[in-house]
Image: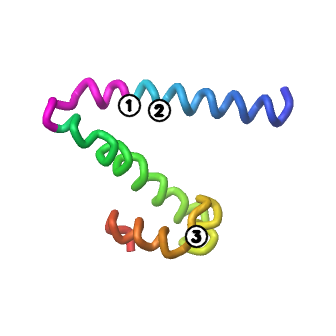
Amino acid sequence: MTNTSSRAGLDASLSETVARTLQDYLDTLGDHEASNIYRLVLDEVERPMLEIMMRYTHSNQSKAAQCMGINRATLRTKLKRHNLL
């Protein structure tokens, strides 16, 4: 298996895992919560991603922002919103 096919397999696996988990999450929500589903899901995914990226980069915000494809100011805003600063 080439590196590209290996990466494609991992991406498909991640996508499948996210889809199953999201479906399970949606199945547990009441109607009133479903109206803000985008924000709910984004918050659930964003926080652990930020935590992992900060560990991965040894809390180097510039490197974490670069890895995530966002600017450092945006990263800081997200870290503050999730009480990670």
- Residue 6 pos. (x, y %): 76, 31
Disc 2 is placed on an element classified as helix
Q: Which residue is mark 2?
A: 18
Mark before the other along the chain sequence, 1 or 3: 1
Locate the C terminus by quadrant: bottom left
Task: Give amino acid for label 3.
Answer: His
Q: Which residues are magenta?
A: 22-32
Mark before the other along the chain sequence, 3 or 2: 2
In this rendering, position of residue 52 left or right of residue 66: left
Task: Give amino acid for label 1.
Answer: Leu
In this rendering, position of residue 33 left or right of residue 85: left
In the image, is residue 17 above or below residue 56? above
- Mark 1 vs mark 3, CA separation in Å: 29 Å
Number of other residues with Cα within 10 Å of mark 3, as a class: few under 14, some 14 to 19, many 20 or more:
few
Disc 3 is placed on an element classified as loop
Mark 1 or 3: the one toward you? 1
For image coordinates 58% across by 66% down, the residue present is: 64
Q: Which residue is mark 1?
A: 22
- Mark 1 vs mark 2, CA separation in Å: 6 Å
Secondary structure mostly taken by the magenta-highlighted segment of the chain: helix
In this rendering, position of residue 27 left or right of residue 18: left
Which quadrant would residue 5 be assigned to in this image? top right
Disc 1 is placed on an element classified as helix
Q: Is residue 23 magenta?
A: yes
Q: Which residue is mark 3?
A: 58
- Residue 69 pos. (x, y %): 61, 60
